[in-house]
Each structure stands twice: as C-alpha cells, then as structure tokens.
C-alpha cells in the first residue's frame, strides 16, 4: 500500500493549464503591483490561492444539475437539499445562501442583540469577524496555545483554550456574550481540527452560561475525518456518525459549501430547533439573499450541493484529501522548509518568518516568498500574515501577526500528486535563496481589506 491514499476517482474532463515563461511571470507580477490577487488566473500555472469553490465536481453532481428545478418558490431542488442537510445535521430548519458570508449576514445580526456584545471563537474567519463587527459586536479569539507551536505534533491544534474561554465569559459577563462560534476545521490556525472532547467542553461552558453555539463548519467533514483518525474511541465510527455527534453540540450551523459541499458556489444555514430565530432568518434572507427556498442559488446549484455534501462524507475521499495535503507538507518538511506541523485539512502553512528573517514584518516576508514562488514556478499561494492583519484602527501602525504564513491551499479533487511534487520543488528553491529575498513597500494601500487591492514595489 502506498503511504498516501490513491485518488478514489479517475479524470473524465480536463482543463488545460499553461506555464508562461519566467520573464513573462516577472513582468505580470510587476504589472500586478506585486500582489498575486491582481494576477489573471490565465497567467497562473498552479493556483493554490484557496480551496473555496475551486474544486472539481463529480459526474453525479453534473448530472444532478440537469434536474435543477428553477422555480422561484417551493423548488423541488430545495426540498432535496433540505432533506440531505437535515439528515447530516439532525437540525430542523434549513435555508440555502449564496455562500458562507451570505449565511453569516443573515444569522450574526440576529445574535448580536445590542451594540458591543461579544462573540468568542477558537479563531474567527475574516468574513465572520467582519460580520460580527458590522453588527456592532466585538470578536474575541480563544485558540489553544498549542496552535502557535508550529514544530511539535499535537492532534487538535484547532481547539479552544477552555480556561481562557471561561475567563473571558466571566470578565465580559455572560449576558454580554452573543455567541460562541466553533470554527471547524480552524481555518486561520492552519485548517487544524477541533476534537469532540474540546467541543463537548465548550458546549458545557456555553450551556452553563446560556450562550448559543454556532458551528462555522465550512470544513466539518475534514474535521470529522481527523476525529476518526486521532481521537480515542472514534476509529470505528462512521464520518456521518461523528458529524452528527458534532452538530448535536451546537444550535446553529453556518456553512460555506464551497469547501466540504464540493461545489463552486453555495452556502447553508441550519438551525437546530429555535423556531423564532428561523422565522427571523426567513424574513431577513428575502431582501439579502433571496426567497427562502433558493437563498441566492439556482435550482441546479442546490442539486449539485445535495450530491456534493454526501460525497464529501465518503471516507476514501477524505483520506485521499487529507493525505494530499500531508504529502505536500512531508515533501517540504523533509527538505527543511519550515511548515506548520502536522498539516491541517486544506492547506500547508509555510512559516516565512523563518525563510526570510531579514525582511521586517511591515515589509511582508510571506508576500515576498509568495511572489518569488510565482516567478519561480507560476504557483499562486496567499499571504496570511501582517499584510492580511492590517493596521491598528487607532494608531494606524502596521500590526504584527504572530506568524508570517504563506498558505498553499489545495483545491479538492483538482491537482495530482505530480503537481504537488512540482510545487514542492519550486518552493524548496525559493526557500534556499530565502535570505536574499527583499521585502515590499506600498505604492497603494486601501483603508480596509488592503491585501486584495494593495500595490507594492520592492523595498531597498
Ligand atoms: N468560514 C470559514 C471557516 C471560511 O474558511 C470561509 C471562507 C468562510 C467562512 C466564508 O465563506 O467564502 O463562502 O463566503 N474561506 C475562504 C478561504 C474564502 O480562502 O479560506 P465564503
């Protein structure tokens, strides 16, 4: 047997990709203001910007799309999707949304009942944090300390710090805490899993303090697989049973279905039993996303999602998926490239603070490595470091991230192990010349969400 799971599928349709010359890549990057977000995807050979909506659908999903019922109200495709989601979650009320942030904009304002209320998460994803703040709330992260130790194995680096969670609730007073959000897997911590033991403890703390629990579960199937692999007592349980046990610990499920829904667009809201909240969400969703039986999706999108949700629970698929990420991580680690270990579910996080230590944080070492990797091999990753973090709203100083990460995010069922060999070889070359890389300085910087539109020039 191979050390890594052989892909449990074969390829039926292909999309050609092209590697433009090194000189062209250098020119394109300069034209893009040294910001890979501004590159044309045609100029990218291997795109590891995100795993969101970038995966390949199966022939079952494509054929289901032909059965989409495009009725504005009461679509058959909605009822099919609803049945699947009810089965997976055990929740009573389901609403589709156009993607994860669409689901967030419906539910989060209903939870934050007063200005200044707190939301606590293991780590908020950026859009989740933004919706908390837009609704007048304040987002507090509460990650376990193991998550910041990149080199040593720990099975559940996505966990909550439970002592800190209790301290925060005590300090802020429970009536001021609008919700606890369990992000599974914990994207910003490297796609690291959260254990059921930890979620059970979060549930006990929340129940004691009468605080609702939300699962931000874009990658809940990957999380369930890690639980099966690593948590005591779960190795003989099915992924579906583990997922059901996970959902039983929360009240609301928000999902960017562009990840473990195996679709290119889609989102979900599921509510366990709070009828009042469901009624409010049904009203809010109409002007924001669409009528409650389509929520911004076409009937065919809901068909593809109904099938994709089931496929993502297949154990062979999940083993292959997690192994593909682990494979890239192993290649890099064996060559000495500093990465977060063990690798998470959807990406390899490369510690660029150690690759290019000469670059100060406010000249963005991970962006410099990311750019050099593009010039080296036409590979696009994404900076998750001080550039993403932005400036202090009061002092306007650049904030310094804990780690300067380059995220190499692996789309689902899209690239082969050969592609990953190539990625590793290119990054190893960049790593070897890391200490010669130069940082970047802004030529344009927007006041918020600067990483998407910023322009730079090389710093001297
Ligand atoms: N929650 C988590 C944990 C996410 O990772 C994302 C998206 C969202 C919510 C928002 O969902 O994009 O469908 O609106 N993450 C993507 C990423 C964009 O690249 O990590 P969305």
Image (spheres, rainbow, N blue to C red):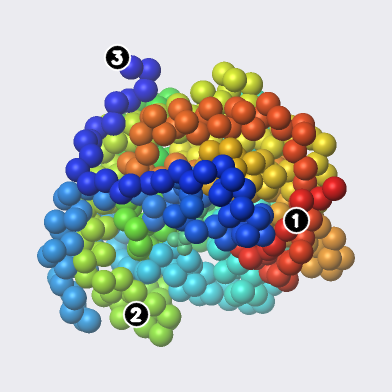
Helix, strand or loop status at disc 3: loop
Q: Does the beta carbon at disc 2 come under 8 Å from ligand 1?
A: no
Tell me residue 413's x, y (percent). 32, 41
Helix, strand or loop status at disc 1: strand
In the rendered image, is residue 126 in sight? no
- Distance, label 1 to label 3, CA atoms, is 49 Å
Residue reaching furthest right? 395
Write down the quadrant of residue 38 in the picture: bottom right
Write down the quadrant of residue 12 in the picture: top left
Q: Which mark is residue 290?
A: 2
Q: Which residue is the site of mark 1? A: 457
Indicate left or right for 323 with 212 as reference: left
Q: Which residue is the site of mark 3? A: 1
Camera-side mark, 1 or 2 = 1
At 34% from the left edge and 80% from the top edge, which residue is drawn? 290
Camera-side mark, 3 or 2 = 3
How dense is the environment of label 1, judged by Cα within 10 Å: few (below 14), some, or many (20 and up)? some
Indicate left or right for 66 with 101 as reference: left
In the rendered image, is residue 436 in sight? yes
How dense is the environment of label 2, judged by Cα within 10 Å: few (below 14), some, or many (20 and up)? some
- Distance, label 1 to label 2, CA atoms, is 43 Å
Point out the tag, 3 or 2, that comes first from the N-terminus.
Answer: 3
Q: Please state which of residues 187 and 204 is positioned toward the viewer in this rendering.
A: 187
């Amino acid at each position: 047997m191979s050390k890594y799971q052989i892909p449990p599928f074969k390829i039926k349709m292909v999309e050609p990709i092209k590697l433009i010359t090194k000189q062209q890549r250098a020119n394109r990057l300069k034209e893009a203001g040294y910001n890979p977000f501004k590159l044309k995807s045609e100029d990218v050979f291997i795109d590891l910007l995100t795993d969101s909506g970038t995966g390949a659908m199966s022939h079952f999903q494509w054929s289901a799309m032909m059965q989409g019922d495009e009725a504005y109200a009461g679509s058959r495709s909605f009822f099919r999707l609803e049945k699947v989601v009810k089965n997976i979650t055990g929740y009573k009320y389901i609403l589709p949304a156009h993607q994860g942030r669409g689901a967030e904009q419906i539910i989060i304002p209903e939870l934050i009942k007063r200005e200044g209320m707190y939301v606590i998460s293991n780590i908020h994803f950026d859009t989740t944090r933004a919706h908390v703040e837009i609704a007048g709330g304040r987002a507090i992260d509460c990650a376990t300390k193991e998550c910041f130790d990149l080199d040593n194995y720990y099975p559940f680096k996505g966990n909550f710090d439970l002592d800190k969670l209790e301290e925060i609730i005590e300090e802020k007073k429970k009536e001021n805490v609008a919700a606890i959000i369990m992000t599974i897997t914990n994207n910003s911590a490297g796609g690291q899993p959260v254990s059921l033991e930890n979620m059970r403890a979060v549930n006990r703390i929340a129940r004691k303090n009468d605080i609702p629990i939300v699962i931000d579960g874009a990658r809940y199937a990957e999380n369930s697989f890690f639980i099966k692999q690593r948590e005591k007592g779960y190795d003989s349980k099915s992924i579906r049973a583990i997922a059901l046990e996970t959902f039983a610990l929360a009240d609301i499920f928000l999902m960017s279905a562009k990840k473990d829904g195996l679709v290119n667009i889609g989102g979900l809201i599921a509510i366990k039993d709070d009828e009042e909240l469901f009624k409010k969400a049904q009203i809010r969703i109409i002007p924001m996303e669409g009528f409650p039986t389509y929520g911004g999706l076409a009937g065919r999108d809901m068909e593809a999602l109904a099938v994709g949700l089931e496929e993502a629970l297949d154990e062979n698929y999940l083993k292959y998926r997690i192994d593909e990420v682990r494979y890239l991580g192993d290649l890099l680690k064996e060559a000495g490239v500093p990465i977060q270990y063990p690798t998470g579910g959807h990406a390899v996080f490369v510690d660029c603070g150690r690759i290019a230590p000469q670059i100060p944080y406010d000249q963005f070492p991970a962006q410099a490595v990311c750019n050099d990797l593009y010039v080296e091999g036409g590979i696009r990753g994404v900076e998750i470091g001080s550039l993403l973090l932005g400036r202090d709203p009061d002092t306007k100083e650049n904030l310094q991230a804990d780690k300067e990460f380059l995220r190499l995010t692996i789309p689902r069922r899209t690239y082969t192990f050969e592609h990953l060999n190539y990625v590793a070889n290119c990054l190893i070359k960049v790593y070897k010349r890391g200490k010669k890389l130069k940082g970047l300085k802004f030529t344009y910087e927007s006041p918020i969400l600067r990483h998407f539109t910023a322009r730079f020039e090389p710093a001297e």
